[in-house]
Image (tube, coloured by chain):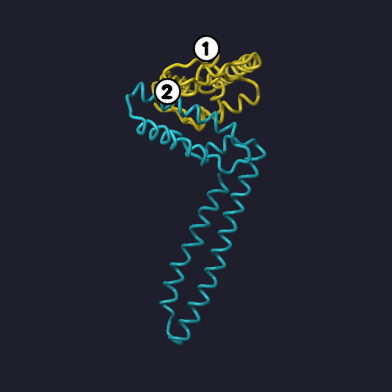
Amino acid sequence: MKRLDKFVERLHKHETNPENSMSGLKQMLYEKVDDLMREEKLSEDEAIDKTIEDFGDESDYHFQNLDKEQKRHLRQKTIRHYRNDLLFASIATLLITAIVGTINYVLFGDYFPWVSIIIVLGVMFWPLSLLYKFLNKKGE
Amino acid sequence: MSISSDVLRGHLESIILTLINDKDRYGYEIVNEIKKRTNGDYMIKEATLYAMVQRLEKKEIITSYIGDKSHGRKRRYYKITTLGKAYLYEKKQEWKTLKSLMALFLEENDEKTG
């Protein structure tokens, strides 16, 4: 059952006082492992695998443990995080565009900057994908 | 037809309380009972169940105790409290009101379309 203990401990690693919550969850998961071994004739390893697999989404578990105010705070924090990512990607893209443009001008002079345009178009997908994620998160 | 988990999420508390009200149950038994009664159309994850029973225990709607040793290990059973019974009664009344309200619109609509 060590693997199950580690799984539960990992779930609670950010909590300041997880003992109570951890022991209850461990108990519930041990019970499931026991039942799976008895009813479905699984080996202990198979039962533990199935228990961990069936457990559900970790973020869902944490999210449901929070009260309304904490959920609101967490949501705002996530959106702030996405906005910072977007800002960083946009500035970095501008810098890369400027550098590539300069190199293009130095190397090729007055020729049309095909190489720069292709590189910049590629780099632009970085902030665009983050913008997509940010808007999706905001709309949830 | 499988049931949207979002629709049921708001009523999960009532479902769990009803099952515990029938008899004291342990965690995996609740999961299995929901699966059995819905013919596998709805399955609750342990992550959801555990978060919910913790919240209900904190509100003193249910309480838990370690049962006698059975099948190798002692199990933690959940039991509804008197406060929980009153809460469940309220939830049932709420559900009846909601059901008649929805019937007023959806069933009337069925008659027109059907």
Measured as percent of width and height from the top left, residue A51 is found at: 42, 32
Q: Which residue is mark 2?
A: B35
Q: Position of residue A61 (x, y in %)?
A: 53, 36
- Picture colour for chain A: cyan
Which residue appears at 59% of the width and 56% of the height? Answer: A83
Label of residue A26 in the image = none
In this view, A31 is above or below A86: above
Q: Nearer the viewer, residue B17 or B92?
A: B17
Vertical comparison of A97 with B84: above or below? below
Q: On what subunit does the disc labeled 1 rest?
A: B
Locate residue A112 relative to residue A42 in the image: left or right. Answer: right
Q: Amino acid at mark 1?
A: Asp
Tell me which chain the residue with mark 2 is part of. B
Assign the N terminus of chain A to one quadrant of the image.
top left
Question: Residue at position x 61%, y 24% from top?
Answer: B57
* Location of the C terminus of chain A (image quadrant): top right
What residue appears at the point 51 percent right and 42 percent down from the top-left corner? A10
Q: Type of residue at label 2?
A: Lys
**Chain represented in yellow:** B
Q: Residues within 10 Å of mark 2 (few under 14, many from 20)?
A: some
Q: Which quarter of the picture shows residue A119? A: bottom left
